[in-house]
Amino acid sequence: MSTAETSVPTPVPTPVPTRARLVGAAGELFRRQGYAATGIKAVLESAHAPYGSLYHFFPGGKAELGVAVIDDGARTFEELVRTHFAPPDDVVTLVRSFFDGAALVVEGSDSADACPVATFAGEVAAADEGMRAAAAAAFRSWIDALTERLVADGLDTTTARELATNGFCLLEGAFLLARVTRDAEPVRAAGRAMAMLTEEALAARSPVGSF
């Protein structure tokens, strides 16, 4: 049998659709340099997309692309939260590992990439209602995902949602501080605080069957 007959063909990569390339390129640029500072030309060049393709896929222009970027980041991060915090692993341990993983992401991106939405959501919140609403829905979906896990661990819905909201605020505040200081330690410190809050909330649960 010849070498040609036994060789394994090299897989041909599946081309990334133009729309997905535009959303991915815009998301990276918005996170790294801001929404206002990113021009359409830069997005097209980064996405290797032909001129005019942006308005083909996003007739509303840059603002509609911004909503798509937020929606894409929202889905990705919600899936991450739901997967990471899936039972039956101990939720306190998962909190610690989640924040530790976030710190590694910060370090791996030189503090430039962290949250897929919040980095530029604050910039556009007062300027565009569509992007503000999309960001608000994204944040709610992440809080909802963690709330559901905490409820499954026996917390009442109000307590679980308050704790999940605290966790979100700790993470996003830590991301901001880490980005400014170029140091991921605030993310790890926030993780220790969230783990402590979670332990305290679980310890204060009403015993099963109590009234």
Image (cartoon, rainbow, N blue to C red):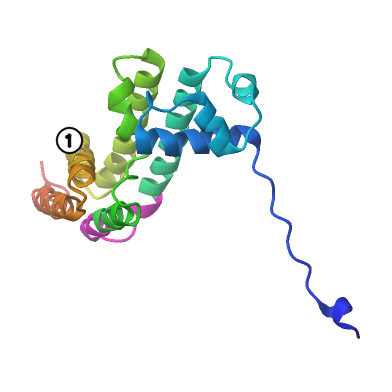
Q: Residue 87 at what x, y percent from top left?
A: 34, 56
Look at label 1 and name its amino acid. Answer: Glu
Q: Is residue 204 visible?
A: yes
Quadrant, the C terminus: top left
Residue at 18% in and 53% down? 191
The quarter of the displayed image where residue 95 is located: bottom left
Residue at 42% in and 28% down? 38
Q: 80 left or right of 177?
A: right
Dominant secondary-structure state across the stretch colored magenta: helix
Q: Which residue is mark 1?
A: 162
Residue at 59% in and 24% down? 54
Is 138 located above or below residue 115 in the figure?
A: above
Q: Is residue 88 magenta?
A: yes
Density class for disc 1 (Cα within 10 Å; few <14, some 14-19, many ≥20) is: few
Look at the image and give the residue range highlighted in magenta: 83-97
Quadrant, the N terminus: bottom right
